[in-house]
Every structure is written in structure tokens, then in C-alpha cells.
Image (tube, rainbow, N blue to C red):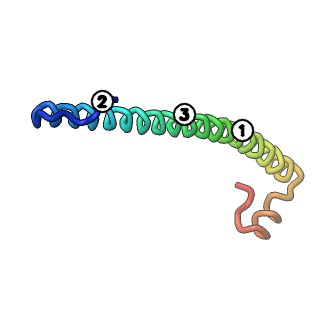
């Protein structure tokens, strides 16, 4: 890299060019950091979305099982007993 110019205008232009390059490099580094963070968050979001889907499947299965248990209780004439004991468990 060249040293300072004796001509003030040339020196000012040189310093501006140096600072502009530093700013471009800084911006590139910041953009790379932001892009890496976005990718990490996307991956985390994908994992969470898959967990939500698994929990939704489990919840739907549990609701079906509960409905089946309620039907069994009603068919065994235990619905009223369970309803009184649990505060309206069986509708």
C-alpha cells in the first residue's frame, strides 16, 4: 500500500478510498453474520414446526382415545357416575 500523498486532495481521496473499503468489508462481514443467523433460525424453526406436527398428531390420537373411553363408559352405564365424580367428564 502506498504511503500518504503530499497533495492534500490526493491524500483526502486516498483516505476516503481506504475508509470506503473498510466500510464495504465491515458491511460484508455483517451481512455474512446476519445470513448465518437467519439460516440457524430457519433450521430451528423447521425443527419446531416438526415438533408441533408431532404433538398435533399425538393430541388428535389422545382425543380419539378419550372419545372411545367416554363411549365405553356410557355404554356400560357408568357415564352418570363418572360425570358426577369428575365434574362433567362425560358429555
The x and y percentages for residue 52 are: 65, 41
In the rendered image, the residue lying farthest to the right is 76
- In the picture, the quarter occupied by the N terminus is top left
Element type at mark 1: helix
Q: Which residue is mark 1?
A: 54
The quadrant where residue 6 appears: top left
The quadrant where residue 41 appears: top right
Q: Which residue is mark 3?
A: 39
Disc nearer the start of the sequence (3/2) = 2
Q: Is 38 on the left-hand or right-hand side of 47?
A: left
Q: CA distance from mark 2 to mark 1?
A: 63 Å
Q: CA distance from mark 3 to mark 1?
A: 23 Å
Mark 3 or 2: in front is 2
Tell me the number on the disc at residue 2: 2
Residue 81 against residue 14 in the figure, above or below: below
The x and y percentages for residue 78 are: 86, 58
In the rendered image, the residue lying farthest to the front is 6
In-front residue for pair 81/8: 8
Amino acid at each position: 500500500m502506498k504511503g500518504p500523498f503530499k497533495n492534500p486532495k490526493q491524500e483526502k481521496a486516498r483516505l476516503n478510498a481506504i475508509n470506503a473499503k473498510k466500510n464495504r468489508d465491515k458491511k460484508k462481514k455483517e451481512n455474512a453474520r446476519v445470513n448465518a443467523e437467519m439460516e440457524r433460525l430457519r433450521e430451528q424453526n423447521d425443527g419446531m414446526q416438526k415438533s408441533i406436527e408431532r404433538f398435533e398428531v399425538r393430541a388428535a390420537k389422545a382425543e380419539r382415545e378419550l372419545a372411545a373411553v367416554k363411549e365405553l363408559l356410557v355404554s356400560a352405564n357408568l357415564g352418570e357416575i363418572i360425570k358426577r365424580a369428575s365434574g362433567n367428564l362425560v358429555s
